[in-house]
Image: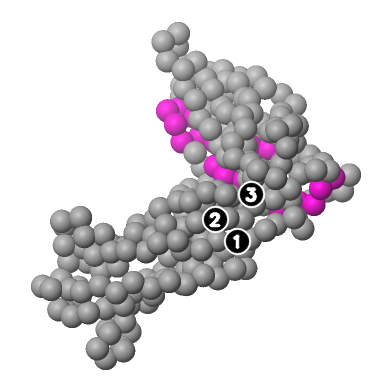
Amino acid sequence: MKKFLLVVSCIICSSVLLYADLSISPAVINVVATDAAIAESTYKVSNTADTKVLFKVSVEDWKNCSQNSSDVTAEKWLKLPQTEFEIAPKATVEVPFRIETFKGMTGSVSAMVVFSSNKNSMINMTMKVPVYLIIDGTEDIDFKIDSLKIDESKQNGNIYAVLNLKNDGNVHIRHTGKVTVYDTETGDIVKKIEIEETFPTYCESSREFTVNIAGKDELKKGKYLALFDLKALGRFVQKSVIFEVNN
């Protein structure tokens, strides 16, 4: 087997997952690998309490593209050589894991690494940390903005657009992009909005996203066009919506 690069990324503005007396880093792992490859790394788990903490680690299946057979389970490609740990007060331990790809894996698979700790006999604390794996060379990247509309149900004066992103491909995507708002009468650009990376849209599924187009009284009375340009994994998609401001 050949080794591959393990890519650790930060999602939702933090690379550390915090819950009660435990913190786990990294909070998300993204991996791109060929089949028949291997990598090893560790989580860092810290105890902020004044007493020791006992916890266990396990693996759960999450989201696989349908091209993978039912026997491509998380336990087959995501290995935990040790599953029980004790952390002294104010200390940190490393939790090793190993990723092994194999023939027959296609598109993307994912898993949750589950950290569970019994604070006492009445409370069981559980944290789940996602691992996303793409098999290099097998990707089918196919997504589009399936629908785009202005949400007029919100009453706080802001203008929101709601888009439905449809992913027909076999890998999960995390899009970025921009919104350009034009005055339809003059053709002038009145605003640009950057869209930061956020939650994934899983393979063969759809996900809804809401974007704040303008704040209260930010745009004068008139008709506008909001042009969405999104990108993910080297693919670009575009869609626009026209709306009016009557204030």
Pointer 1 with pointer 2, Cβ within 8 A: yes
**Residue picked out by circle 1:** 142
Seen from this angle, which residue lies furthest top? 121
**Image coords of residue 57 (percent x, y):** 62, 25
**Image coords of residue 181 (percent x, y):** 32, 77
241 relative to 83 in the view: left or right = left
132 relative to 150 in the view: left or right = right
> Which sits in the foreground, 72 or 123?
72
- For the point 64% across and 45% down, the residue is 65
**Image coords of residue 245 (percent x, y):** 17, 73
Q: Main SS of the magenta segment?
A: strand
- For the point 81% across and 48% down, the residue is 35
Q: Earlier in the sequence, mark 3 or mark 1?
A: 3
Q: Earlier in the sequence, mark 1 or mark 2?
A: 1
Seen from this angle, which residue lies furthest right? 1
Residue 100 position by quadrant: top right
The secondary structure type at the circle numbered 2 is strand
**Residue picked out by circle 2:** 167
**Image coords of residue 39 (percent x, y):** 78, 43
The secondary structure type at the circle numbered 3 is strand
> Which sits in the foreground, 119 or 192?
192
Which amino acid type is marked by label 2? Asn
**How many other residues sit within 10 Å of disc 2, few (<14), some (14-19) or many (≥20)?**
many
- For the record, the magenta segment spans 18-43
**Residue picked out by circle 3:** 30
